[in-house]
């Protein structure tokens, strides 16, 4: 066993890894090594690991096999799981059989057919790190909840006190007809139905095979928006509308034109979502049916550490995996005042409009999430639809989402629309005329040598 431990005054993240199946070690070990198998790459040894892996990404299945047969060093790069994952995804087979790894799945190989090759003295962070991150121990992550936990809440309390705050409701899901869902039930009722899991559309039974037997750094997360409409299924019968505490969802007035808004979520431990804000300025609730989810949250105006955002928030760059972010940035996040907590089975977490959030499954989990528009956040949603049309998502046939939403609000809820527009106007402050801005600038730019005695 390889035991790695990252310690700070706030967190201990453990990686308890069996040796890499090919014998690959972290690059730092090369400095004390007597030999390095990487030189067996020949002329390719002059390329960086990152570039060589990128080149391999252009290979077909046959070419990747041929490349891996050139030498053990080539085999190390040619066996990278991400390369084989891309080949499986490109093939886009809904009836594929999961074999325990992307390489075995792409080649349709059983364990007995796999050659066990050990590569001595091979050092590469880019090949070792994904394997290490697949064995991160998340049990030490949760500390005392800083996300408020409430046993119940009224609509009035939500709209006046809690619409801008994250919280966890602790006595909700057991009352749902969907609370009896578990993996075995879903397999029995919907095992042959196709579900969306990030980049693949698989039968549910294939995804469950994957869920229970994979070593991915970032396991695929089943995130299906059409679960209620599955033909011949019963999920729609079990599903209920939002828990009444959240009140009216104003996107409901769009009817069939409303954007995607509800998802069935299934995933193994370590699966989840990296930092993001919910689409179109909406709020959300997330109801855990089985398992437990660890949440880290930041208010809208506080970008999480390790996350880089363009000024218009159109592009977000962050570490590629949750494990990488947790091991590198969680201590800093706690110093800067994040909210964090665990949402257990039978509980609902509220995500207010605009809040950054990362979520990771602490165990195999089933959940439902739904985006909604409460009156408190009508101004944010209207502003988003009007001012960020290039970032709008989830609308199917609606050409002008802002115009259509405004028209429906005017027809159905004119008073609420007027209040929302009033808040938008008030948030802008008094309009500054250009002449006054120039005069103010002129006054503030008086000449000075800047000597200490001035």
Image (tube, helix red, strand yellow):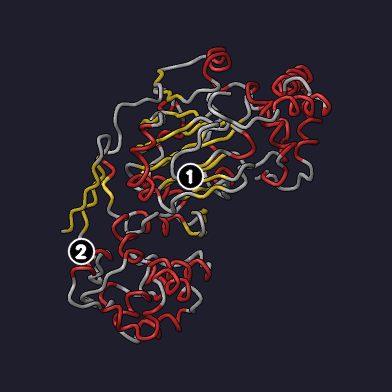
* Quadrant of the image occupied by residue 170: top left
Question: Dot 2 corresponds to which residue?
Answer: 19
Relative placement, left or right, of 234 versus 272 is: right
Relative placement, left or right, of 407 versus 342 is: right
Question: Dot 1 corresponds to which residue?
Answer: 307
Residue at 66%, 29% in the rendered image: 380
Neighbour tally class for label 1: few under 14, some 14-19, many 20 plus, Cα within 10 Å:
some
- Residue 434 in the image: above or below residue 234: above
Residue at 39%, 47% in the rendered image: 325
Residue at the extreme left of the image, as rendered? 1
Q: Which of marks 2 and 1 is nearer the N terminus?
A: 2
| Residue 384 percent across, percent down from the top left | 69, 35
Q: In which quarter of the image is the N terminus?
A: bottom left
Residue at 42%, 70% in the rendered image: 84
- Residue 121 in the image: above or below residue 308: below
- Residue 143 in the image: above or below residue 156: below
Q: Can residue 296 be seen by looking at this rendering?
A: yes
- Residue 351 in the image: above or below residue 65: above
| Residue 345 percent across, percent down from the top left | 36, 33
């Amino acid at each position: 066993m390889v035991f790695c431990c990252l310690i700070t005054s706030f967190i201990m993240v453990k990686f308890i890894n069996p040796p890499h199946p090919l014998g690959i070690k972290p690059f730092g070990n090369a400095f004390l090594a007597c030999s390095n198998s990487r030189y067996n790459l020949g002329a390719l040894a002059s390329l960086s690991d990152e570039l060589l892996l990128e080149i391999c990404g252009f290979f077909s299945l046959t070419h990747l096999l041929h490349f891996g047969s050139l030498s053990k060093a080539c085999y190390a790069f040619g066996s990278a799981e991400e390369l084989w994952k891309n080949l499986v995804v490109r093939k886009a087979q809904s009836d594929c059989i999961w074999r325990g790894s992307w390489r075995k799945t792409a080649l349709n190989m059983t364990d007995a057919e796999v050659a066990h090759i050990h590569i001595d003295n091979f050092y590469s962070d880019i090949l070792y790190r994904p394997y290490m991150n697949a064995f991160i121990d998340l049990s030490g992550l949760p500390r005392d909840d800083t996300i408020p936990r409430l046993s119940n809440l009224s609509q009035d309390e939500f709209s006046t006190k809690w619409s801008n705050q994250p919280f966890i409701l602790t006595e909700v899901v057991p009352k749902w007809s969907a609370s009896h869902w578990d993996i075995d039930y879903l397999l029995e009722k919907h095992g042959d139905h196709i579900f969306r899991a990030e980049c693949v559309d698989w039968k549910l039974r294939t995804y469950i095979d994957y869920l229970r037997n994979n070593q991915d750094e970032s396991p695929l997360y089943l995130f299906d928006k059409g679960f209620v409409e599955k033909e011949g299924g019963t999920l729609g019968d079990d599903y209920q509308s939002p828990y009444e505490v959240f009140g009216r969802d104003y996107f409901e007035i769009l009817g069939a034109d409303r954007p995607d808004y509800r998802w069935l979520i299934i995933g193994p431990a370590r699966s989840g979502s990296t930092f993001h804000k919910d689409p179109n300025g909406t709020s959300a609730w997330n109801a855990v049916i089985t398992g437990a989810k660890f949440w880290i949250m930041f208010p809208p105006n506080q970008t999480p550490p390790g996350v880089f955002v363009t000024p218009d928030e159109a592009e977000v760059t962050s570490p590629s995996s949750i494990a990488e972010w947790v091991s590198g940035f969680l201590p800093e996040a706690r110093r800067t005042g994040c909210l964090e907590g665990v949402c257990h089975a039978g509980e609902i977490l509220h995500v207010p409009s605009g809040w950054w959030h990362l979520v990771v499954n602490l165990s195999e989990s089933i959940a439902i999430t739904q985006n909604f528009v409460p009156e408190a956040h009508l101004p944010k949603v209207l502003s988003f639809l009007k001012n960020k049309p290039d970032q709008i998502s989830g609308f199917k046939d609606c050409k002008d989402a802002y115009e259509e939403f405004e028209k429906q609000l005017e027809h159905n809820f004119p008073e609420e629309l007027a209040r929302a527009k009033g808040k938008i106007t008030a948030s802008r402050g008094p309009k500054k005329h250009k002449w006054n801005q120039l005069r103010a600038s002129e006054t503030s730019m008086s000449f000075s040598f800047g000597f200490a005695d001035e």
